[in-house]
Image: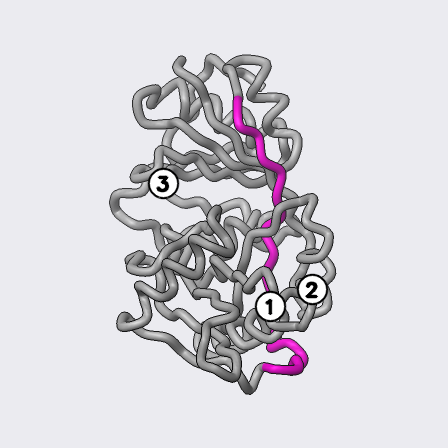
Amino acid sequence: MQATTLAPRAADLFTQGLERRTGAALLRFGAARPRPADRISWTADGAAAWLDDARGHVWSVGEPEAAAGLVLRAALALPDRVREFTGPRGTEALVGRHLPVTDIVEWIFRWTVEAPPVQRGEDRVIALDESHHEELLAFLTEHSPAHSTGPGSADVSLWAGIRNADGRLVACGALSSLRDSGAPLMASVATDATQRGQGLGAALTSWLTRHAVRHHGFCTLWQLADNTPADRLYTRLGYRNEDPCVSGHLTAH
């Protein structure tokens, strides 16, 4: 890995066929094809990377050493624009040999192309619209303060929820989208803290997955690596677990 050799920007992320390999689903689902005119991207033998300029985030897939090389090259070429990165597990240590890396998070990019088995309680799930945004925000603030996506986000195409017998919201979730490709991404699934263990999260996740598969042919989501209950649920619903990822922040360089 040559951190000081800047790789040329790539015209096409898909010339190597990486998207067909196990562990590269982030490229398969996350990068638009054909290439958007304003996307900055890089390739090397065994890796590909592209920049989400709005976030200052470089996404990379492939062999860890080659992917880390592309992250470093992007950071060196665009020091004022690259602040974060995601790559295959192990990328963080390789990048960290050359640049300070903080806020490391290990997670899994999960995906399915199959509708899941119907879960108990799916018939209680309802679609929610803009008139429910205030209610959704209050619910998420109370029961999932670290939620990734909030009501009113331009990336969200659908909010759904479950109400109890008196009409109170007890679970919610959204279908958002990956910024570059527009692929469906499940986000901000939350359950009332007093109602957990009753299958509400499974019902909502299954319903949203079924909706995405019906309309897009697949669904994706992000799972923290140490979230054992989520791992069991997503496996039961048919989500593939082949793409261990790591993300981190690059401090000033």
Query: What residue span does the magenta drawing correspond to?
Result: 102-121
Please state the horizontal and vertical placement of residue 75, each as a whole percent of the image. 41, 22
Q: Amino acid at mark 2?
A: Leu
Query: Around disc 2, counting alpha carbons within 10 Å, would you say few (fewer than 14), some (14 to 19), or many (20 or more)?
Result: some
Quarter that holds the C terminus:
top left
Q: Is residue 15 above or below residue 97?
A: below
Task: Say which element carries label 3.
Answer: strand
Front disc: 3 or 2: 2
Task: Say which element carries label 1.
Answer: helix
* Residue that appears at 62% across and 27% down: 65
**Does the segment drawn in magenta span residue 249?**
no
Query: Around disc 1, counting alpha carbons within 10 Å, would you say few (fewer than 14), some (14 to 19), or many (20 or more)?
Result: many
Q: Is residue 72 above or below residue 232?
A: above
Please state the horizontal and vertical placement of residue 73, each as a whole percent of the image. 44, 22
From the viewer's perspective, tell me whether residue 85 is left or right of residue 10. right
Disc 3 target residue: 52
Disc 2 target residue: 233
Task: Say which element carries label 2.
Answer: helix
**Sequence order check, earlier mark of 2 and 1:** 1
